[in-house]
Amino acid sequence: MNHEIQPMPSRSQPFLRIVGWLFVVAVLIVLSILLWGNNLLVSIDPMPTHVDSAVVLQGSILGEKARLTGAISLLQQGVANRVLVSVPKESYWGQSIPPVARAYLERTYGEQLASRVDFCETSAGVNSTAQEAEVLMGCIQEHTWRSIVIVTSDYHTHRARILWRKTIARHDPALHFSMEGVADPEFQKPWWRHRQAAKIWLGECTRFLWTLLGGP
């Protein structure tokens, strides 16, 4: 009587299946990041019909100009009564920033719009969104504003919203705020095809994760 010898199952087969599934999951995660990675960083509110001021956060030179343009647009539309611009107290060479900024506003947007812009100066020790929010809250309270829209780059809105919500809760819970994101020329899309945009995305994701974990 002939007995066929059954092959022993390979011990490597379960391992290979696990590796295969892990590879599929990794590919799906990467594709999701590429397709929807921008949405992870963006949190923009519907534009309110009216606010006391549009608050412009600091950024790179190109980013700052885009944010300022967005805020001035809110002035022109009648959405905001005034604009508050966060600026360093002085340049690297000790030059006072507000007079230079005022001249730029008058030259670019005209004296009438420039006259409705205020400045909030931050010291050299302010190097984070959380620290900037603390300083700006002091300026906002000095003006006794009750509603603001915070204007920043779109990729910065989600993290800025979390930090500003905490800051407002500590200092003035009755203050109503919303986020307005503007397209930043340095954050081109799709972000993974541009070196500077990829650098911004990775850096902002790291800071966003740090914020979610309770960091400032």
Image: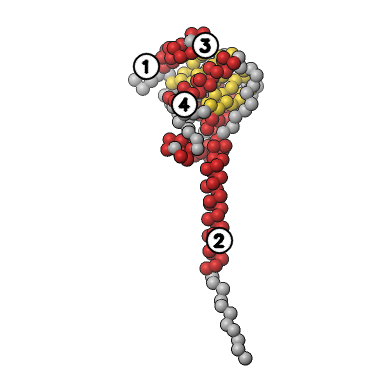
Work out whether residue 144 or residue 20 is closer to the camera in this orientation and state it.
20
Place residue 55 in its image quadrant.
top right
* Quadrant housing the N terminus: bottom right
Q: Amino acid at mark 1?
A: Gln
Q: Amino acid at mark 2?
A: Ile
Q: Which mark is residue 113?
A: 3
Give 109 or 178, whichever is nearer the viewer. 109
Q: Earlier in the sequence, mark 4 or mark 3?
A: 4
How far apart, in angstroms, are the residues tagged by discs 2 and 4? 45 Å
Do labels 1 and 2 touch, CB within 8 Å? no
The 10 Å Cα crowd at callout 4, few under 14, some 14 to 19, many 20 or more, is many
Inter-mark Cα distance, 1 to 2: 62 Å
Residue indicated by mark 1: 95
Give x and y (percent) for residue 119. 49, 16
Q: Where does the image place residue 134, in percent across and percent down from the top left?
A: 53, 24
Task: For the residues labelled 2 and 3, say whether their Cβ atoms are less than 8 Å apart.
Answer: no
Residue furthest out toward the bottom: 1
Which of pointers 2 and 4 lies earlier in the amino acid sequence? Answer: 2
Q: Residue 175, position in %: x, y?
A: 63, 21
Image depth: mark 1 or mark 2 in front = 2
Q: Which residue is mark 2?
A: 18
